[in-house]
Image: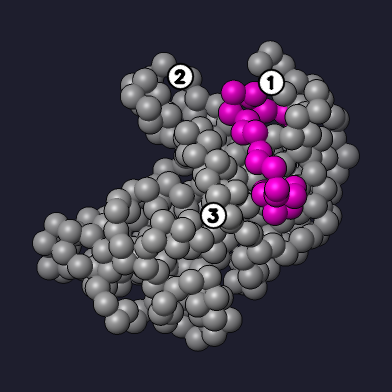
């Protein structure tokens, strides 16, 4: 499924099977998660994709040598810049990303830098493990940046939140879910996944939060989350794109509250989460689409009509 221009539907096409170059591995794709970042790419909100482009970066497949591997968003870094040298490869200025700079997994075949592929744990089928490769990884990194917060607010209950909620409960944290006003299904979903309270995104929770994680790409939620925070708490913005943050009074930020963003991921994030997943154990809730219905899956995601995660079965 090929993107030729922003804001155009993906086109089903026959393209040549890619040949792996030096240091690359080729996978026959079995599943690829559908991510909100895919929407940001197709909608032109991320402005410099390779075109034409095969999107998709939560890829599960089998390599030519028989190994089952996952391919995440981070597809290549230079390994030498000051960010890479200090363990922050997610910030590499020369980084290339799967399904953005590099062709991704909305296809039968894909090639990737072998160093950035992740071995996948046993006990997860291909469709169930796919959402861990971005929704799970970004949620996990966001939870790490929340520090040791006991009372954690999750804003937006989609693919990432439904995974990180399970990790947070496994760690003994208390969860509070915030969903779009009037979305009773999402509110019930948050409660099903262990939130002790769930309400609308503009509400205050019954207790002050120690940290808030924003998965919804809505800038107006930043001041709303700050209002819900106890002193010293962070608001962690977990999306790659967000609408503009409106102005807010300094008193919301005072008392050492903070606002920070999560950018991409590291291979260490992937290794840690995939080792942890069987221990929790994480159980992803997925809605499966065939490859040729990728546009329908994206539209359903845009409309908020996916419970858990959408996955293409190739």
Label 2: which secondary element: loop
**Between discs 3 and 2, the one toward the N terminus:** 2
Side (left or right) of 46 relative to 295: left
The image quarter in which residue 7 lies: bottom right
Label 2: how many residues lie within 10 Å, few (<14), some (14-19) or many (20+)? Answer: some
Mark 1 highlights which residue? Answer: 24
Mark 3 highlights which residue? Answer: 280
Seen at 69% across and 20% down, the residue is 24
Q: Position of residue 303 (x, y in %)?
A: 62, 72
- Against 124, residue 154 (above or below) is below
Mark 2 highlights which residue? Answer: 79
Residue 87 within the magenta-colored segment of the rendering: no
Label 3: which secondary element: loop
| C-alpha span from label 2 to label 1 | 16 Å
Q: Residue furthest top?
A: 22
**Between discs 2 and 1, the one toward the N terminus:** 1
- Against 238, residue 56 (above or below) is above
147 and 279: which one is in front?
A: 279
Seen at 30% across and 72% down, the residue is 224
Report the span colored magenta.
109-130
Image marks 1 and 3: residues in contact by CB distance under 8 Å: no
């Amino acid at each position: 499924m090929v993107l030729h221009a922003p804001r155009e539907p993906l086109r089903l096409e026959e393209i040549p099977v890619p040949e792996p170059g030096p240091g690359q591995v080729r996978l026959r794709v079995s599943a690829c998660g559908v991510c909100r970042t895919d929407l940001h790419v197709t909608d032109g909100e991320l402005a410099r994709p390779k075109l034409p482009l095969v999107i998709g970066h939560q890829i599960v497949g089998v390599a030519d040598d028989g190994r089952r591997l996952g391919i995440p968003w981070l597809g290549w870094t230079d390994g030498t810049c000051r960010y890479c040298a200090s363990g922050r490869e997610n910030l590499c200025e020369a980084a290339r990303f799967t399904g953005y700079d590099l062709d991704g997994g909305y296809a039968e075949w894909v090639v990737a830098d072998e160093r950035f592929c992740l071995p996948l744990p046993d006990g997860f089928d291909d469709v169930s493990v796919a959402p861990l490769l971005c929704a799970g990884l970004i949620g996990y990194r966001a939870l790490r940046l929340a520090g040791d917060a006991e009372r954690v607010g999750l804003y937006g209950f989609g693919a990432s939140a439904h995974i990180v909620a399970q990790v947070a409960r496994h760690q003994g944290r208390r969860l509070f879910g915030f969903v779009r006003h009037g979305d009773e299904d999402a509110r019930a979903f948050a409660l099903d996944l262990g939130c002790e309270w769930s309400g609308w995104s503009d509400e205050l929770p019954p207790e002050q939060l120690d940290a808030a994680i924003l998965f919804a790409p809505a800038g107006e939620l930043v001041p709303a989350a700050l209002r819900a925070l106890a002193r010293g708490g962070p608001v962690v913005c977990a999306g790659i794109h967000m609408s503009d943050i409106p102005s807010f009074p300094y008193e919301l930020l005072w008392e050492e509250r903070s606002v920070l963003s999560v950018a991409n991921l590291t291979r260490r994030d992937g290794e840690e989460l995939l080792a942890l997943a069987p221990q929790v154990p994480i159980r992803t809730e997925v809605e499966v689409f065939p490859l040729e219905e990728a546009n329908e899956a994206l539209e359903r995601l845009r409309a908020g009509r996916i419970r858990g995660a959408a996955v293409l079965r190739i």
